[in-house]
Image (tube, grey):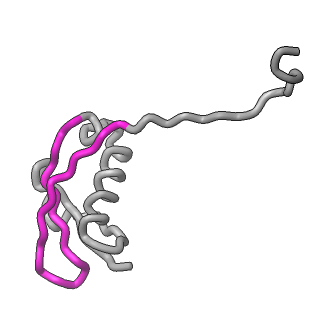
Amino acid sequence: MNKYEVWCPEIGQTWDDAKTINAFDPELAATLWAHWHDGYTACFEIVNGTELLVCVSEWGTNAVQEFIINGEIERVYRCRGVKNFGEKGA
C-alpha cells in the first residue's frame, strides 16, 4: 500500500488541507477520500449526485493527479432467521 495526500479544490481545500489516505493506487485514494468526506461532513453530497474534482499526490512527490469523483446511494438489506413454525402447508 502507498500513502497519498488527497484534497478537493472545489470546496476550498489546498494541499495544506490534504487528508492522508493509504491505498493501492491514486484512484482508490480518491474514492476512499470521497467515502470519508461524505461521512465526515454528514452532507452526503457526493452520493446525492454532486461531482467533485479531487487532487491526489503520492506521499513524498510533487506530482498531482486529478480525478472527478461521483457516487450513488447503495441499497443495503439485512435478513435474519426467525422461529421455525413448521413445514410449508402445515
Tell me the residue at 84%/27% (across/down): 83
Asked whether 77 or 64 is in front, the reply is: 77
Relative to residue 82, is residue 75 drawn left or right? Answer: left
Where 75 sits versus 1, above or below?
A: above
**Magenta residue check for 18:** no
Where 70 sits versus 77, above or below?
A: below
Where does the magenta region start and end?
49-73
Tell me the residue at 85%/27% (across/down): 84
Asked whether 15 or 1 is in front, the reply is: 1
Q: Quadrant of residue 42?
A: top left
Q: Quadrant of the C terminus?
A: top right
Residue 78 point in image, percent of width and height:
60, 35
Residue 67 point in image, percent of width and height:
15, 59
Where 12 sits versus 30, above or below?
A: above
Q: Quadrant of the N terminus?
A: bottom left
Tell me the residue at 89%/23% (across/down): 86
Q: Quadrant of residue 68?
A: bottom left
Relative to residue 22, is residue 55 drawn left or right? Answer: left
Residue sitting at the far front? 89
Relative to residue 34, is residue 87 drawn left or right? Answer: right
**Magenta residue check for 69:** yes
Asked whether 74 or 36 is in front, the reply is: 74
Residue sitting at the far bottom? 60
- The count of marks equals 0
Tell me the residue at 20%/51% (across/down): 69
Asked whether 20 or 68 is in front, the reply is: 68
